Image (cartoon, helix red, strand yellow):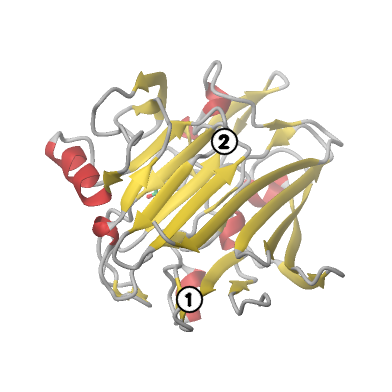
Amino acid sequence: MNKRGSSISVLDFGATWYEYRLARHDQTTQNVLLNEPDIAHYLNNPFYLGATIGRVTGRIKNGRFTLGGKQFQLQQNEGATTLHGGPHGFAYLQWEGTILSTDEGDNYLQFSRQVDQSLDGFPGTMTVTVTYSLSEDDIVDITYQAICDTDTLFSPTCHAYFNLNKDNQDIRNHDIKSNAQFVEALDEEHVPNGILAPIDNDMYDYRNFKNVGQAIKSIIDSNHGAGIDDTFLTPAGADVTIRDQESNLTLQTTADRNGVTIFTANGFTPTMQTNKGAGKPFLGIAVEPHILSNAINLEGFGNMILKAGVNQTYHARYHVSEGV
Ligand code: FUC
């Protein structure tokens, strides 16, 4: 908790971000993350609510890649595809948690653990830490750090879903803005096929604020999916803003990666019991910064290789503040 009275809470299973509770100007507090109050749901978390994703976010075609002249076959968990690190990805692991604090009074929560090839199929034994911090002005910084004894892949993200409503409405009343000018084109298995499609005044054009409900509708109407579930090229880092004029809140996401996936909870089912009621499509919106999906198999899509012995750090920052 910071001095303003805002707080975050996390779960050690999946190094999961559970709650982001803001102290509002009207003296109330409001949690802006979608979560499942029955913690047991997180053991089987098919939509990765709040989870840390790794070693690699997004989809790897056929769960296969070549590194240092060697071919690796990962475990597949979505047909032939390896999604979000596979069946033993970060989201499904128990992490070791520690509370850290500094003289400045900032709040830090750190998770750490080791993963190795016998667990998740990615090469090498990797030590990972995920550190959540909450600043005095309510900025949540998530720092991902990893080092591995061989060359491997590392492209983590945060799979938190936001819902800025005060009540249980879904996120179709929110607006989205992003400078992205290209989106990854997908094959029939929803895996990026190596084409970066230019965005031009179409359903993916969020250069001016666009209503999320309208964005979803135009994707559905043109048979491009069941809502937003796309990865955008963001060379200057994820630059996504989501606002809700009803609750007067704005979420700003920044990161140091070349891509961001926007996912509007398409396909959520009533088997989920969330803090916003039974699961249904569009109950939350995830803003997931990472290196472009399937980049390891595509030329010029970004570098997710972590060289042996190199200590790699990435950040993702989320800031919800009063005003639109
Ligand atoms: C997102 C999407 C996927 C998936 C998952 C829960 O990152 O890209 O399609 O359904 O999260």
Q: Residues within 10 Å of mark 1 (few under 14, many from 20)?
A: few
- Residue at position x 52%, y 73% from top? 22
Residue sitting nearer the eye, 182 or 30? 30
* Residue 169: assigned label: none
Q: Measure the C-alpha gap from mark 2 to mark 1.
A: 30 Å
Residue sitting nearer the eye, 190 or 129? 129
Residue 309 sits above or below residue 161 on the image: above
N-term-proximal mark, 2 vs 1: 1
Residue 285 vs residue 282: left or right?
A: right
Q: Farthest residue toward the top?
A: 299
* Residue 237: assigned label: 2
Q: Residues within 10 Å of mark 2 (few under 14, many from 20)?
A: many
- Residue at position x 54%, y 57% from top? 319
For the residue marked with disc 2, what is the amino acid?
Gly
For the residue marked with disc 1, what is the amino acid?
His
Residue 322 sits above or below residue 63 on the image: below
Quadrant assignment, res 204: top left
**In the picture, which quadrant includes the N terminus?**
bottom right
Residue 161 x, y percent position in the rendering: 43, 60
**In the picture, which quadrant includes the C terminus?**
bottom left
Residue 122 x, y percent position in the rendering: 66, 40
* Residue 25: assigned label: 1
Asked whether residue 124 is in view, the answer is yes
Residue 19 vs residue 179: left or right?
A: right
Asked whether residue 85 is in view, the answer is no
Residue 21 x, y percent position in the rendering: 52, 74
Asked if the beta carbon under badge 1 is closer than 8 A to the nearest atom of ligand 1, the reply is no
- Tell me the element at label 1: loop
Quadrant assignment, res 165: bottom left
- Residue at position x 36%, y 33% from top? 207
Residue 279 sits above or below residue 319 on the image: below
Asked if the beta carbon under badge 2 is closer than 8 A to the nearest atom of ligand 1, the reply is no
